Amino acid sequence: MSDQITQQKINQAAWAACDTFRGAVDPAQYKDYILVMLFLKYISDLWADRVNQYRAQYSNDEARIRRRLERERFVLPEGASYYDLYEKRNEPNIGELINIALEKIEDTNRSKLEGVFRNIDFNSEANLGRPKDRNRRLKNMLEDFAKPELDLSPSRVSEDIIGECYIYLISRFASDAGKKAGEFFTPAPVSRLLAKLAAPKPGNTICDPACGSGSLLIRAAEEVGSDNFALYGQEVNGATWALARMNMFLHAKDAARIEWCDTLNSPSLVEGDHLLKFDVVVANPPFSLDKWGAENAETDTFKRFWRGVPPKSKGDYGFISHMIEIAKRHSGRVAVIVPHGVLFRGGAEGKIRQALIEENLLDAVIGLPANLFTTTGIPVAILVFDRSREEGGANEKRKDVLFIDASKEFTASKTQNVMEDVHIEKVLAAYRVREFADKFTYVATPEEIAENDYNLNIPRYVDTFEPEQEIDVAAVQREINSIEAELADVRQRMAEYLKELGVDA
């Protein structure tokens, strides 16, 4: 069985397990139950595999086996595995028993899993229905995960496949639940493009201050090409923060520091009285967030909004300001997804935008196709900031800003547009070369941007105008005459047929 087939089968089997809830429970609610159960099944299969391995290795010497197990990445306490729960699947309090098992796992592995299950309740009547219905759904779910296709033993499938299955499920939930659940997931092609533009290197610290389920951080880590990196994230939604923690664990990135906090009002990635600084900062923050905390910005402890306070109804530049402030001076790189309004809106946003450009921090503006996201059909852009361009940095002599119009770089699908590898590579090649390409790229000088009042709207720089094809009026008239002659002939023949049939026209 090839990895590709194994990945596909596991994905299909995990998604099929959702049938227990479909139609009865909203996807935004039941996603957490499925994802937690997948996590529990994985660590149970991994633990059982290790137990069997050590039993064979140490000839059932229980003391030695126990010592080896205590040194594993995590410890699965007695009675708390998926298989223990499966045996009790007919119990009338099965929801409560699952809660107890998860609490035991969390208590035993506090350094890695503390708080991860606090937002999930398998005994919730509000989410899962009255006891009879709830017990039936939970029993069916436990039985679904007992299928051979969901045997997640390391001898059968790799960590990469498990992690990708988790991301696959998250993406499907985001797609099915739309705006209710899509906010925690960035489409994989967009994540890959953003990660490649940020270009993390071995030894880098990488942060996503609006990390959602953590998939963008994982993509950024993959770009490093080694295990020599450190991951950091912040997420305001408790349930989504838990998904991110489990996502990191499933991808063997247990050391990632993911904080549950409000990044703009009370960031937790701090050291003493200052914010932690990072080599690479990436994010897909919520677009134009209303009530983001503008009232607290003037007195911000970390003075992140010294260029100006964004409007209270649009938090885009709040996130951008935070990201630039946490990027290391003279070397940090920032890549962020934004709605197009960020490129041209005036007022406070216009002043912040002007300050960032005058500081020579903006490196590139990349327009993406419309309808890439589950949450919105609007086109979005990627802004790349590079602190190595500021005075004293390695690229301080680079003063231009690269504009790329990638709005046509997609393949249309039934529900969403998709950027494929060929589209991503075209954008990356243009970013590396930084040269003019007709109707695709433009390299703007600071003077040109200033002349445009610091408006970064891409059509001001990349000429995307397609002239209409010239029409040969004489040829068109000839075609019309020919059609009219054919029509007259058809009418004459029709009249003759009707006459033969004795039908009055």
Image: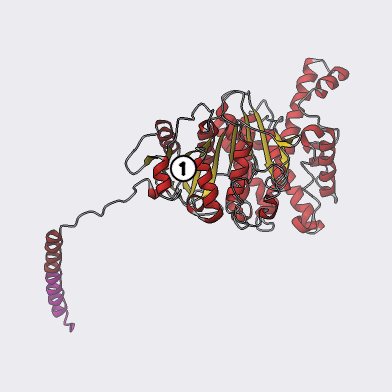
**Residue located farthest toward the bottom when viewing the structure as drawn:** 504
Report the amino acid beneath label 1: Val
Q: Is residue 492 above or below residue 46?
A: below
For disc 1, the marked residue is 365
Q: Position of residue 9 (x, y in %)?
A: 59, 37
**Does 72 sit left or right of 277 as displayed?**
right
Q: Quadrant location of the C terminus? A: bottom left
Q: Position of residue 230 (x, y in %)?
A: 66, 28
Circle 1: is it few (<14), some (14-19), or many (20+) Cα within 10 Å? Answer: many
Task: Please give the name of the residue rendered at 78% of the width and 15% of the height, measured from the top-left corner.
Answer: 57
Q: Quadrant location of the N terminus? A: top right
Task: Compare residues 401 and 205 and report the one nearer the observer.
Answer: 401
Q: Is residue 446 visible?
A: yes
Q: Based on the displayed image, in which of its 4 quarters is residue 6 positioned?
A: top right
| Residue segment shown in magenta | 487-505
**Residue located farthest toward the right when viewing the structure as drawn:** 63
